[in-house]
Image (cartoon, rainbow, N blue to C red):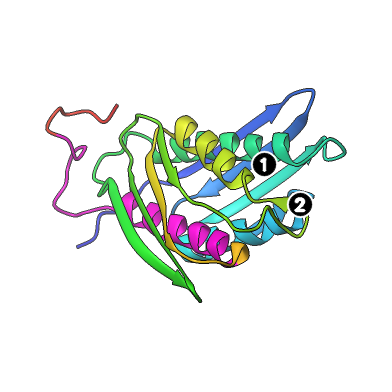
Amino acid sequence: MSIILKERKGEYKRKTLETEIEVKIDLDGKGINNLQTEIYFLNHILALFTCHGLFDLEVKARGDLEVDYHHTVEDIGICLGEAIKKALQDKKGIKRYGFTILPMDESLVQVALDLSGRGQLVYKVQFEQERVGSFEVNLVEEFFRGLSFHAGITLHINLLYGKNSHHIIEAIFKAFGRVLNEATRKDDRLNDVFSTKGIID
C-alpha cells in the first residue's frame, strides 16, 4: 500500500529594486504550468522541467530586462529553490537521491542530486554559442546556483557531449525535472529521513 502524502506545495515571493517574483510549486502535480517570466526561452525550459518532473509550477516575474536577463533569471532560481525547500517539509520517507543521463538529439547530459540540505553546485558545461536567441547561455549556471543553494540541494550537472546550445539546455532542464521527481518520491520502506544521522541538514 502506498503512503498517503500530505500536500507538498511551496510558495515564495521576492521583491527587490531589480525584480518582483512569485513562485508556487506542487511536487505531486501533473506537469501543469503557468509561466509568466517575460523571457520566452526561460518559459520554454521551465515548461520542460515541469513536464518531465510532473510538477505543477506557477511563476510570475517582472524584472529589469532593459539592463539584461541576469537578475530575473537568478532570482527566479532563488525563489524556486525556496519554494522547493518549503514543499519538501521534513523530508521524511523520500528517496533523497536522483540520477539520470538524458539525450537530446546530438547532446547527452548527466544530472545527479542529493536533497542533502547543503546547497552545492558542480556545473561542468561548455557551450559553443554564447546565446540562444536573446538568452545568454551562462545564465543557466546562475539559475541553478541560486536554486541549489536556496533549496539545500547538492546538484551535479555535466555535459557529456553536444554542440547545439538549445539542445544542451533543454536536456539539462528535462534531466533536472526527472531527478528531482525521483528524489522527492516516497519509499514505503522509509518511515523517517533517509540518513544514518537521523536528520537531513
Query: Dot 1: few (<14), some (14–19), or many (≥20) neighbours within 10 Å?
Result: many
Q: In this view, does 90 lie to the left or right of 24?
A: left
The residues colored magenta run 167-195
Q: Of residues 179 and 191, which is closer to you in this image?
A: 179
For the residue labelled by badge 2, is the local secondary structure a helix, a strand or a loop? loop
Q: Which mark is residue 22?
A: none
Q: As drawn, which residue projects farthest toward the top?
A: 17
Q: Would you identify the image quadrant in which residue 24 lies?
A: top right
Q: Of residues 190 and 162, which is closer to you in this image?
A: 162
Q: In this view, does 116 lie to the left or right of 37?
A: left
For residue 200: magenta?
no
Q: Which residue is drawn at 65% across and 34% down?
A: 75
Q: Would you identify the image quadrant in which residue 35 lies?
A: bottom right
Name the spot of residue 16 as percent of width and height, x first: 74, 24
Residue type at the position of mark 2: Ile
Query: Dot 2: few (<14), some (14–19), or many (≥20) neighbours within 10 Å?
Result: some
Task: Name the residue beneath numbered marker 2.
Answer: 39
Task: Name the residue beneath numbered marker 1.
Answer: 73
Residue 104 in the image: above or below residue 154: below
